[in-house]
Amino acid sequence: MIFEGIEFPTPPPYKIKMIEYTNLPSLEERRQVLREAGYNVFNIPSEKIYIDLLTDSGTSAMSDLQWSALMRGDEAYASAKSFFHLKDAIQEIMGFNYVIPTHQGRAAEYLMFRALDLKPNEYALSNQFFDTTRANVEVLGATAVDLVNEDAYDVTKEVPFKGNIDLQKVEAFLSEHHERVKIIVLTITNNSGGGQPVSMENIRKLGELAHEFKVPYFLDAARFAENAYFIKMRENGYQDKTIKEIAREMFSYADGVLVSAKKDGLVNIGGFIALNDKDLYWKIRQLMVVTEGFPTYGGLAGRDLEALAQGLKEVLDERYLQSRVEQVAFLGKLLDKNGVPLLKPFGGHGIYLDGLRFVPHIPREQWPSQAVVCAIYEHSAIRTVEIGSLIFAKKDANGVWQWPKLDFIRLAIPRRVYTLDHMLYIAQSISDLYKQRENIKGLRMTFEPPVLRHFNALFEPVT
Ligand code: F0G
């Protein structure tokens, strides 16, 4: 009864029809796997993983209705029935005039920034850009600016909408540079800052500012349903509204969305852009045929479009969202009770451990959070991911590292995949590791890729 006094999460509104076996490799094997992977968990073969918390992206379990929707996929090259099903589903929730499927979120980002013709000396603003979104701004030579509110950098401060953008900073920035700001992208929920929600008030007021300065305003809506659920739980005036009504209102303030459907779309692959601007829509249509495919399939099969159309309906189910968010919070509470340092409030799609407090003996140059990620795998065959220095640190003109304020180990919980007993195993294992944290050693980077470093970097332990 170590977890006495903790409230248990609401059970999900579904039961399990199919299972997939996993392996629990021995300690010796785990050590060898880590060595062979260059201490980068992206390189660990998934069959060597017992519980995979690398990401909540593309890892959802589909429902029986989604699997049967696959069979209805219309594989016509152009203007397939499945495209129109998806378009209807998106318009019903989001209300935009035009819908463009893409193979995943970053393809939507790339197309949007190309269509807007982002150039060096120009800016894109956000509460916090996700890493691929930032990379898609930066590869065009433009600058991605994060303007999240200051509370977001205070790991233990409990505020309801820690994902909010700082409207005063946005106004100041726009007053000075609005001719050179090409787009504002508000990330809901804010993944880089811990899966934290953005309030309706903030979404609306940012829209007012963007429109006053005539800057296109898009939501990075990968986790829009989780954001809507938090609004229902935490913001005055929304308790009696449905998730669908709340979502519809969120989207009503924006000019469009960039979406990785691999999260709240409840599918394994897919993304889309939806927007109102006709000219921009036609620019994207023309760009995308070169890389993504015809504008009614955008790199996806007809069956993928069907499964997504169904997933978007299912994700609005409030009982699902409640059990989802409560499951994540339950894991957070167990870890918290055992003293493991973590970000509060708990995020929508995962728990973010505070690497700097977990292993204060490891200097920043030795990638503390990545060291914990490796230690967690070695200890219990759980794969987590670093969301910190490895992703966000930059070198200044003299080659000196500039460290980000936040340095997390993210435990991203796949949707509808793991059960309460998995949460207990995770909490038990990480709490146990935390008790032996002095034994965790830092890492030296032996290969440093120039972009999106975390995917391909290699390390060795510091001896
Ligand atoms: N925007 C957000 C907020 C994201 O979290 C992601 C992906 C993307 C855009 C890009 O979408 O992967 O479909 O190309 N996040 C994943 C993660 C990779 O693990 O958090 P994508």
Image (cartoon, helix red, strand yellow):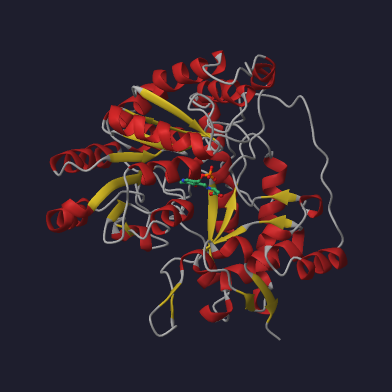
* Side (left or right) of 293 relative to 125: right
Percent of width and height locating residue 327:
58, 40
Percent of width and height locating residue 255:
28, 33
Please report the residue visible at 72 percent of the width from the left and 60 percent of the height from the top: 43
Q: Quadrant of residue 112?
A: top left
Q: Quadrant of residue 156?
A: bottom left
Closer to us: 35 or 463 = 35
Q: Is residue 343 shown above or below 232?
A: below
Closer to us: 437 or 60 = 60
* Side (left or right) of 177 relative to 295: left
Percent of width and height locating residue 276:
30, 27
Please report the residue visible at 69 percent of the width from the left and 38 percent of the height from the top: 419
Please report the residue visible at 39 percent of the width from the left and 35 percent of the height from the top: 284
Q: Is residue 236 shown above or below 453?
A: above
Q: Quadrant of residue 33?
A: bottom right
Closer to us: 30 or 400 = 400
Percent of width and height locating residue 428:
70, 56
* Side (left or right) of 292 relative to 379: left
Please report the residue visible at 83 percent of the width from the left and 40 percent of the height from the top: 21
Q: Is residue 431 shown above or below 256?
A: below
Q: Could you tell me which quadrant the C terminus lies in?
A: bottom right
How many marks are shown on the rendered structure? 0
- The reply to whether residue 459 is visible in this rendering is yes
- The reply to whether residue 242 is visible in this rendering is no
